[in-house]
Image (spheres, rainbow, N blue to C red):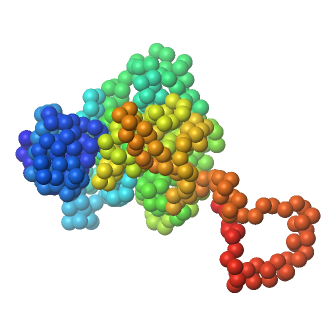
Amino acid sequence: MGERLAGAEKEVLVEIVRFTQKNGLKGAEGGWKDFLAQNDKKYGVSVSDPKKRTKDVLLAFLATFSKDFQKYFSKLVRRHAERRAIEQYMNEFSGKISPEQKLVQLTTEHTEYRKNYYFPSYQEGWKIVRIGKLASSMNSGAMLAIDCEMVLCNDGTEAVVRVCVVDNKLEVKLDTLVNPLKAIADYRTNITGVSKKDLEGVKCSLVDVQKSLKKLLAKGKILAGHSLYRDLYVLKFDYSRVIDTAYIFKYANLPTTASASLNSLCKSVCGYTLREEGKPHDCLKDAEAAMNLVTAKLKDGFNDPIEIAENSVPESDQMTLLAHRIPVYLLSQELLKIFSGNPSIEEKIDSRIRGEFYSTRILFKDIDEADKAFDELDGQETKDTSGRLKKSVLLKRDNGDVATFFVRKMVYGSRVNNSEVSKKRTQPTDSGEQKKEDANGDKQKRQRTSKKHGKKAKTVAVE
């Protein structure tokens, strides 16, 4: 075992073990629970939360993995060390930190950062790019902004088909179509603006794009984007000096874990409409919009919360369902059997594992398919505290066991079902009755007042 991994703090090792659980990784003695069952005769799997285990036990489990995996684990430890070094440098030399770097820090402090920016860069084809010397990186304000368009492939994964990069003067540094080099199931032309014909004769590959990005980001340039982790994931590009425009603004009427769409932020912050409803994305304009948002944040601050329409969520989120409180023993691919349509699993790292559970996203080809899949789920429909519809569902496994977890929509202020409507509001009256009520408004007001002090009223406002 490498010295870096052996010398890591316990909290870092806990995250790495949870990482192996989430991704179903196994060493020479199996997964985490298999290891405990074989090596702990006293407690076995009854105490399987890594946080409740000693550092020696965590290290012993990680030591069962191959040398290649241990090298990757060491890279995760190094990433933690780099993050702490940045935090310490910013505390000690706050006057020397560039405004752009402060936005990088603001991104990393967001509650969703660790969930979304831990990439499976141990997998084949991934590139890990380090930021270079710490002092020079902290003082530099050089930036680029990126946006990608993705298609759905036959194997259920997403692949990039167009990449655009601009600098802080909005000069185009990269604008290229990309050949996925595998069969495409859905070009999503209504969203991507890319068709089968557009890709005919395209020779640029993902590897070519990775090389171009590495060259563009030389000397630790900052990379900006909206929900940037999605672009980095499909690019298989692990880079830590980032500004996510979804994370650097506060929202007055959305939960802390929520983000507004790029179009909505452009309206609220920059004062222009990025695209009309239903129009396909323009990759280059989206990259420019991300840079415009960063520039506006640097210039005007926008420290006060921004009002965002409740239903204003990214189209990609509207095409997604979130499955959460999934038992860690249930592999993510097993979830697909309960959904209609042809969904795929978002194979990104989700470090939000709490004890024995994790969460993941189910991706659909369009909003209608996602809505239909949710409606057809067999389970009791309720709402979470943010007004998003959710269901508690059961999944019967091949071995006969039954697993329970939740599935919810990503849209805020979702519809109220018929049973809720009948309970929460009175039915509208016809025009004649309405006129009569208007004419006797004072009488009605007195009746409502008397009810308020007597029997509690059953009618409440509906969202």
- Which quarter of the image is occupied by the C terminus? bottom right
Seen as rendered, the residue at the extreme front is 400
Which residue lies at the image location 47% right of the left edge and 55% below the top edge? 258
Badge count: 0
State left or right for residue 463 relative to residue 292. Answer: right
Is 178 placed above or below 324 here?
A: above
Q: Name the residue rendered at 44%, 40% in the picture.
A: 395
* Residue 152, position as x, y percentages in the image: 47, 28
Whether residue 19 is visible, yes or no, is: yes
Whole-percent x, y for residue 118 in the image: 30, 45
Which quadrant holds residue 132?
top left
Residue at 69% x, 70% y is 458
Question: Foreground residue, 403 or 295?
Answer: 403
Residue 187 spot, x, y in % from top left: 52, 26
Determine whether, in the image, residue 223 is placed left or right of residue 127: right
Left or right: where does residue 285 sit relative to residue 27? right
- Left/right of residue 423 with respect to residue 161 in the rendered view: right
Q: Is 44 in front, or is 81?
A: 44
The residue sitting at the top extreme is: 201
Relative height, residue 296 to residue 184 (above, below): below
Residue 201 lies, with reference to residue 342, above or below; the image says above
Task: From the top left corner, tell me how far across and down residue 150 is, in percent.
Answer: 47, 32
Which residue corresponds to the image point at 52% horizontal and 49% vertical from the top-left?
391
Looking at the image, can residue 219 be seen?
A: no
Point out the image quarter for the N terminus: top left
